[in-house]
Amino acid sequence: MSVILGLLVVLIAAGSAFAGPLDAPGATKALTCSACHGMNGLSVSNTMPILAGILPAYFKKAIEDYATGKRPSPEMEPYAKAVKVLGIDELAGYFAAQKKEPTLIRADAAAAARGKAAAAQCAVCHGPDGRGDPAKVIPDLRGQPPGYLRSQMALFKTDKRSPGDPALKAVKALMTTIPDPTLDDLAAYFSSVR
Amino acid sequence: MVTLTRRDFLRTSTTGLGLLAAGCAAPMTGDIAPKTGRRVVVIGGGWGGASAAKYLRLSDPSIDVVLLEPNENFVSCPFSNLVLSGVRTIGSITFDYRGLRRHGVNVMHREATAIEPDTKRVRIGEGYLQYDRLIVSPGVEFQWEQVEGLAQHKDTVLHAWKAGPQTVELARQLQSMPDGGVFVLTVPPVAYRCPPGPYERACMVAWYLKTRKPKSKLIVLDANQNVVSKTALFRGVWSKDYPNLDYRPSSKVVKVDPGVREVQTEIGDKVKYDVLNLIPPQRAGTIAVQADLVGADKRWCEVNHVTYESAKAKGVHVIGDATTGLPVPKSGNIANNMGKISAVAVAALLNGKEPPQLPPGNTCYSWVNDREAIAVVNSYRIDGGKVVQIEQKLTPGPSAQYGQHAVGWATSIWNDMLAFGRGD
């Protein structure tokens, strides 16, 4: 907010006629997304993921998988098809360029502490604090809403997210070994890492 | 949630600096706020208008944006059926306009009384405001005259179709109905605001009766031949969970007699009620009809599919439930999208640029009990200057997971319109 106000003051002072925050490439095409994912991809809800700062390759794989129904979602499948019409590269670039800020949803501190103790098994791929690995298109888990992280872990565990995807075989095998209460703790932990 | 702190007040006042000195001190006759730069006036602070106002400021911060909305608070129609069943409070779906003021929108709690496209003026009682472009988000008005006996009883026969005091009163009537009573809900003929809304309401009333007043019954009198939206999903829920729900299609209510607590359908059936919720037939909000923005049907407004400029008046854009001709439902999500797209288009036009071709999208959840929801999602593209549907998807059935998604959607889109959180 303060950034936008600051920008506003500068623009008014400079007498600029047309240079708003929506001038960034792809910004107006992302307007349909902002109803759920927030302005600039900064989701305010517990269930919708933060798209700001997303790896472009990860965004594009998600959109492709949603659009083909490989990653089943009645909510995202139609929108993924719309993203492909609008321009998947432009939207991937737009969200990747937005500054990520962590979720406003506060996780339970005790659950987060238990999650941290249980997170070693995730570090093999996601890194010690869940930062991910861009080279391998492994996503950054830090600061995502706990509800979103928890729901994705449940989808992995029950093989409902992109069933049969060879790239997800290891994570799904791991999830089946983790009890549900520990999944809650892991979601609390990764959402609270700053 | 709706109290203004001193800090907020100061922020609001300084944001308005150099724009308009807001409504309170302005004279009520003549030009009530003389225009100094380019100005867009937005009529109506609902789902469409609030979104348009915010996104106009984001599109071009040099544009002076005046939002005319008589109500001090925004009450969300989506989720208001949960207030009927006591699952939510009206306070949890009531918000103020501070967030828009922080964006530099001049929110005036005044009612626009007329539009004069030739002189580019909006009349507000004895005074007027000058505009460069106008965005009208008038919502719907009820066609009281379509139901005999309704016009003279319109304050006591409840619609609860604009969330607010009637929502609270209908909830009170439902709660005080004796067990064994009959609740009658009537559904108007298409087109009306929120196609699945009456059926979600039927679910919430049936759920409430089933859990609190098990000897009671809900009769749904539908003017349409079948459930208009999410048909198989609603009917599946009703046959499985709500034996207390008596659904009667092709039962258009044409008469109401509150004295004997009875409604009459077009085919002459008379139905007694203990509590009545009569949702009347609808048309575009009154100002759109008075300004002759409606088409030959005298009900709805034809618009350009890219800019939302009225087919009837140059420089006037119409958004939300009042529009017709696009293959989209009259939903809050669509109104929000139309608000944003029209804002970008208007900013482009004021700057001599070509408006981008942006299609809307629609995400629509309906609650079927206190924790489970269903959804329909539509995506669109622009083809030859027209909005065309790409795909419609429904959830396979109700689930608590979709209920959680519904809460996430509401949290996000309320914030997208009214800007009370971050990321705006």
Image: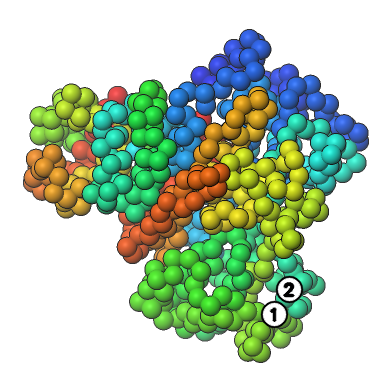
Crowd band around label 1 with a 10 angstrom C-alpha radius: few (<14), some (14–19), many (20+): some
- Height in image: B45 above or below B399? above
Look at 8% across and 45% down and name the residue there.
Answer: A173
Q: Earlier in the sequence, mark 2 or mark 1?
A: 2
Residue A62 shows in this picture: yes
Q: Residues within 10 Å of mark 2 (few under 14, many from 20)?
A: some
Rendering coords of residue B356 (x, y %): 54, 33
- Label 2 and label 1: CA atoms lie apart by 7 Å
Residue beneath the point at 32% across and 63% down: B396
Q: Is residue B408 left or right of residue A54?
A: right
Q: Chain of mark 2?
A: B
Q: Position of residue B247 (x, y in %)?
A: 50, 80
Q: What residue do we see at 79% from left, 21% from top?
A: B36
Q: Residue furthest front?
A: B384
Query: Are circles 2 and 1 on residues that touch, CB within 8 Å?
Result: yes
When asked about the image quadrant of residue A106, the answer is top left
Q: Which mark, by number, is residue B254?
A: 1
Q: Is residue B149 left or right of residue A187?
A: right
**Residue A151 visible in the picture:** no
- Measuring from the top left, give residue B120's x and y in whole percent: 81, 36
Q: Amino acid at mark 2?
A: Gln
A59 left or right, relative to A16:
left
Residue for badge 2: B146
**Disc 1 element:** strand
